[in-house]
Amino acid sequence: MRASKILFLLFLLPIQIAFAQFTLTDTTFVNDNLVDSSLTTSADWKSEPGKLLLQTGENENLARNKSAYIVFRSRNLPVDTASRNANRLLDGSFFSPSFVQILSLNAGPGGEGTYIMIDLQAIRSVNRVKMWQLGFYPNGPTNLPTHLRVRAYTIYGGLDTLAMEKLVQVPENTFGITDDFFEKVVDIRFLKITVDVLDQVQSTVISEIQVFGKGYLPEGFYTSTVRDLGQPVNFSKVTWNAEKPEDTQISVRLRTGHTAKVDTNWSDWREDSATVSGTLLPVFEPRRYVQYQIRLGTQTLFTPKVEDISIHYDTKLVAQSTDASITPQYSTILTENIFTYKIVINKGSTDYSIDTIVIGTPTPSILNDVTINGVKVSYSVNTFSDRIIIALSSPITSTSTLEAKIKCTPFLGVNRFSSTLISKDAPGNPQRVDTKKSSGIEAWSVLTTDVPKKLLIDYRIAPNPFTPNGDGINDKTQLTFFLANIAEPRVLIGNQLRKLNIKIFDLTGRLIKNLYDSDARAAAFVAQNAIDWDGKDDNGKVVRPGVYIAQIVIDSDNGGEQSAKTITVVY
């Protein structure tokens, strides 16, 4: 531990810095009273006093909830398809119907050599494997019949599935629970268990496979107790000092509230985490109380080590309180509408003035008008695909109500228009605007009606035909569409992505151009977000005049959707 930090041991110290800024700093993690143990898992702050790192995994099942598959050697398979799902062997359940069945030789001739491949999803130091016959479970009876056991098996391990080392071979097994320790600790990602012998009459039925080792656990969370800053504050950056080996991760997220006890009035954990020290997190503010959570991760044999963490804040506010809402709050999907976005701003006598308002837009939007207390005001605007930035000619210095008229086409089930206030006196520390919530829906959100079940909506190409001849007129065409119904917004439903692929083919089916190939969430691919094609192939050459096919494919759980339209290239 650095000498300069010895005085701060075991507590948080507010440090005043320039421009009324303060810092709340944890310089050590040895005080158990500063840890919320109910939200802390697999984190170690005792083995190296003053540092936070991952726990080691001697007693942790490294295979739990990872992935596995089984390759059957017999042509005859179990009738119950669920009993062929090897992921059931890693789910932590020892009871029916969580098992995998391998048929007997009578029912499945040629089944010897069937194997299970486990992907630990990271390199781990492994030295032990346990297998459980269906019927056996931890702390359960041990005098059960073992007729469903694995008769003989071999365990292999490797960094990939091609070059694997034999670690254990058991030519004859009589136990319902096998527990094999390796002669040495091996660094592997993949584990293969081959069933060498099957019974003539009885099936082999396995309920669980466990893998143990010596290295660090792949993920851990350290959560602080609720911290009292003494008064409502405006939060700024989160910084930390740490050792971070390659392929390890550190991220920090916050939640804030008005009360010392976390309740329904507290904000949720921020869906956005700081992965780089010095990140500004858009938490709800001003708030008096804060709680932080550090996530540590590794895909190697090493662990990150956090030495300290600091939460920077300002006691001088941009506004004492704010409240944003939008009307109408219900609108027909894919129908252009004009919405009134209102922010009620309560100012204190010492607050910073407000010069800029940023409104996040879930779909490309146009600002039509701005009023303050019902009077039109002068402003300049910068419009982007995901936000509108309003710079006021005269700053807001007293309690006011701002209204902005926004024209857009909502396409999500729930369309969130969050906002922040910025002062030129503290430009690096904007203040997030508050909003009320009813039945889980925030007042700054537009809910759409008549939502179609399709994922791909309103696919268009224009101009069509187009002329990529370099004369500056119709040299490119745009593909526009809406991608909907992919579990949005993330804060309410979840962060789900789908593979989106857009390709250009000629009429023979030959691939000409791969325009887009990436994961995507619900979005409006219109205006600035439209997909352009300049008439060139993957080699950068302009294609010949003719008719081409533009195909969009979006993956989904029900098999996905695709749509194709023709594009005509002329000169």
Image (cartoon, helix red, strand yellow):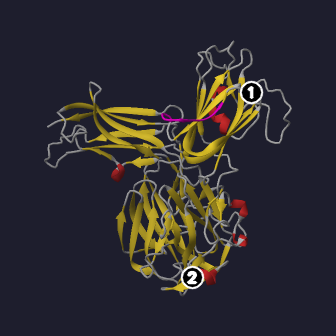
- State which quadrant residue 87 falls in: top right
Q: Which SS class for mark 2?
A: helix
Q: Position of residue 491 (x, y in %)?
A: 57, 55
Q: Which residues are magenta?
A: 161-169
Q: CA distance from mark 2 to mark 1?
A: 59 Å
Q: Position of residue 433 (x, y in %)?
A: 53, 69
| Residue 64 in sight in this render | no
Q: Residue at x 62, y 20 (%)?
A: 112
Q: Residue at x 47, y 36 (%)?
A: 555
Q: Residue at x 58, y 15 (%)?
A: 75
Q: Nearer the viewer, residue 355 or 182?
A: 182
The answer to if 163 sits in the magenta stretch is yes
The answer to if 369 sits in the magenta stretch is no
**Disc marking residue 3:** 2
- 30 sits left or right of 421 in the view: right
Q: Residue at x 37, y 75 (%)?
A: 378
Q: Nearer the viewer, residue 348 or 34?
A: 34
258 over 274 or under it: above or below: below
263 over 196 or under it: above or below: below
**Disc marking residue 149:** 1
Mark 2 or mark 1, earlier in chain:
2
Q: Position of residue 539 (x, y in %)?
A: 22, 39
Toward the front, the furthest residue is 183
* Quadrant that contains the N terminus: bottom right
* Quadrant that contains the C terminus: top left
Q: Nearer the viewer, residue 292 or 89?
A: 89
| Residue 434 in sight in this render | yes
- 377 sits left or right of 570 in the view: right
Q: Nearer the viewer, residue 481 or 94?
A: 94
Q: Position of residue 386 (x, y in %)?
A: 42, 58
